[in-house]
Image (cartoon, helix red, strand yellow):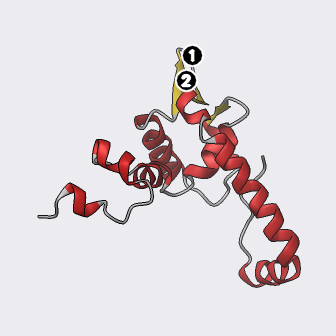
Amino acid sequence: METNEKKHENCYMRETCLKDDLCPMVLAYNLLSGKRKVMILWFLSNKVLRFNEILKRMPDVTQKMLTKQLRSLEADHLITRHVYPTVPPKVEYEITEIGKKIIPLLELMHQFGASYIETFRDELNERKKAEDNPDICNH
């Protein structure tokens, strides 16, 4: 079995990883990986949304998949789910304080995307025509 020291010997942030035997980059990757988690956080970054409002912004996602991703984000404390005792039930999702810490990274990703579009606009338009993929961002 590999020692903790050996496991992190080439790590850029070695001291942090050794402190908790947990790489912050691996943790962040695991928290954000999953179908549509980044987009869900982006949608919730500036307002509280109901389930169907999130679903409408992601036309290629099933209710089952969205529910799974929302539950995962909630279990990881990145969003909260508020259920109101009404008929039919009203459920709202909101980004948490710890979840808000990812917003600057999401903004940088958005800026990178805008820059990439500017650089490769023609090529991206050709790909989009060929793929016929729906856009998912109605932010």
**Is the Cβ of the residue at disc 1 closer than 8 Å to that at disc 2?**
yes
Return the x and y of residue 97 as percentages of the image width and height.
57, 27
- Asked whether, in this view, residue 7 is left or right of residue 3, the answer is right
Name the residue tied to disc 2.
89
What residue occupies the far left of the structure in this picture?
1
Q: How many marks?
A: 2
- Residue sitting at x 67%, y 53%: 58
Residue closer to the observer: 41 or 54: 41
Residue at the (45%, 32%) spot, across then down: 77
Q: Residue at x 78, y 77 (%)?
A: 128
Label 2 neighbour load within 10 Å: few <14, some 14-19, many 20+: few
Q: Secondary structure at mark 1?
A: loop
Of 123 and 15, nearer the camera is 15
Q: Residue at x 53, y 31 (%)?
A: 98
Rendering coords of residue 138 (x, y %): 78, 50
- Residue type at mark 2: give it: Pro
Q: What residue would you read off at disc 1?
A: 86
Residue 43 appears in which quarter of the rendering?
A: top right
Image side of residue 127 versus residue 52, left or right: right
Q: Position of residue 61 (x, y in %)?
A: 59, 56
Q: Is residue 67 above or below residue 33?
A: above
Q: Nearer the viewer, residue 120 or 16?
A: 16
Judged from the image, the secondary structure of the residue bearing numbered disc 2 is loop
* Type of amino acid under label 1: Thr
Q: In the picture provided, is 100 more to the left or to the right than 30?
A: right
Gap between marks 1 and 2, in whole Å? 5 Å
